[in-house]
Amino acid sequence: MELEELRKVWKQQETRGKMEYTRPELLMLINNRVIAMEREIRARDRREILACILVIVSFGTLFFSTTSIWQQLGCMVLVMAGFVVWYKLKAAQPVAQEQEASYNRPMKEHLRLELERAGRQRRLLNSVGSWYVLPFTLGLLLFTVGFDSSLGFKVGYAAFVLVLGGWVWKMNRDTARSRFDPLIRELSEAIEFVEEEGA
């Protein structure tokens, strides 16, 4: 069940003046949407951390095998970027207290916690340009300068890296707007509803 269904329940309660669902059932409705979001986030984090490990190992190895100062500098930036991205993703994950079963918590506290998690993910996606796109783009551009190839290839490769970086930035901003903004709005409405009910 989605939060859209929860909205319908709220409207029915206002018109009929009686509750059709208990608070645990309302919490379950809300959790269905939040759990789906958290699964997507965990899957994304696993993929991104695996990619970071590959970047760290690959460019860490290349650092020692290349003789180009530009490529070594690019490798250093890319390895550091891999560690930064890994850290940012881990830092945005729920802490142990947040992962505890929330059935014994008051509903309002649970909703506020979920709202905070969603807000943290939205901020992470909205700031992806500074901690993700910029370091990887810079590292790849420095690495490109060290290529022993024609200027045309370097310019073409640099253009590809810039376009790819812009696309990643836009995709993350769009995801923040299309997925997390509505969820944050729905969680805020749920908190208002619980407060009105005296929770």
Image (spheres, rainbow, N blue to C red):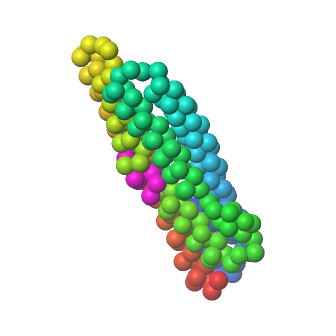
Residue 171 visible in the picture: no
Locate the N terminus and report the quarter of the image it occupies. bottom right
Please check the rendered image and state whether residue 127 is part of the magenta-colored stretch, yes or no: yes
Report the residue at 57% width, 41% height from top: 49
Q: Position of residue 93 (x, y in %)?
A: 59, 56
Nearer to the camera, 85 or 176? 85
Question: Magenta region: which residues?
Answer: 123-129
Q: Quadrant of residue 147?
A: top left
Q: Main secondary structure of the magenta part?
A: helix
Nearer to the camera, 48 or 38? 48
> 13 above or below 61?
below
Residue 191 visible in the picture: yes
Q: Is residue 86 left or right of residue 145?
A: right
Locate the C terminus and report the quarter of the image it occupies. bottom right
Q: Position of residue 173 (x, y in %)?
A: 40, 49
> 1 above or below 40?
below
> 124 above or below 18?
above
